[in-house]
Image: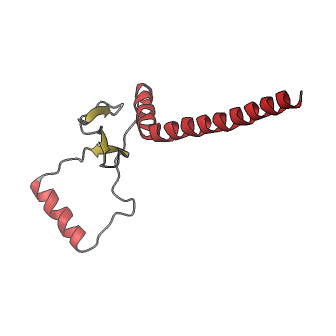
Amino acid sequence: MKMKNDLMICECHSPEHQYIYSYDEDVDKNGVVDRTVYVHVHLNKQTFWRRIILGIKYIFGYQSRYGAFDEFIVNPSDVDKFEKIVKFLKVDDLEKEIEDINKQIDIESRYYIEDIDEHESNE
């Protein structure tokens, strides 16, 4: 399957705050479907000298007490994209659930048919 992409841009409309989702679906030689969603996060670009300073700090183990964070403000219109990711990844669960329901229906129908046959043989 060709990878499909989806883009989510921060509510602040900064091009530096964006997520790119790539949907991938592989089928192995046994027919098992493996679904994966890759999330590509844009990292802020730094000047050459700033990267050197950050690299030196990293080498000597310096860490900010706050960690290395940025933010992404989710726009309410992006909720559908999150739902799409969940549905894409849960398809196997849904197919398994449907298969389990069908098995249960088969079992129950067999008992029903046996009851009918038993009732008819008693008459």
Picture coordinates of residue 56 (x, y %)?
18, 69
In the rendered structure, the answer to whether residue 104 lies left or right of residue 11 reads right
Viewed as shown, does residue 32 lie left or right of 20? right
Q: Where is residue 39 drawn, in percent x and y?
A: 31, 44
| Quadrant, the C terminus | top right
Going by the image, does 51 lie left or right of 33? left
Residue 89: % across, % down: 42, 40
Name the foreground residue: 43 vs 36: 36
Q: Residue at x 12, y 52 (%)?
A: 47
Q: Position of residue 108 (x, y in %)?
A: 71, 35
Residue positioned 34% across, 34% down in the render: 10
Pick the front one: 107 or 2: 107
Residue furthest bottom in the image? 60
Judge by depth and name the residue closer to the eye, 43 or 89: 89
Image vertical order of residue 52 relative to residue 95, above or below: below
Tell me which residue sits at (27%, 34%) in the image. 5
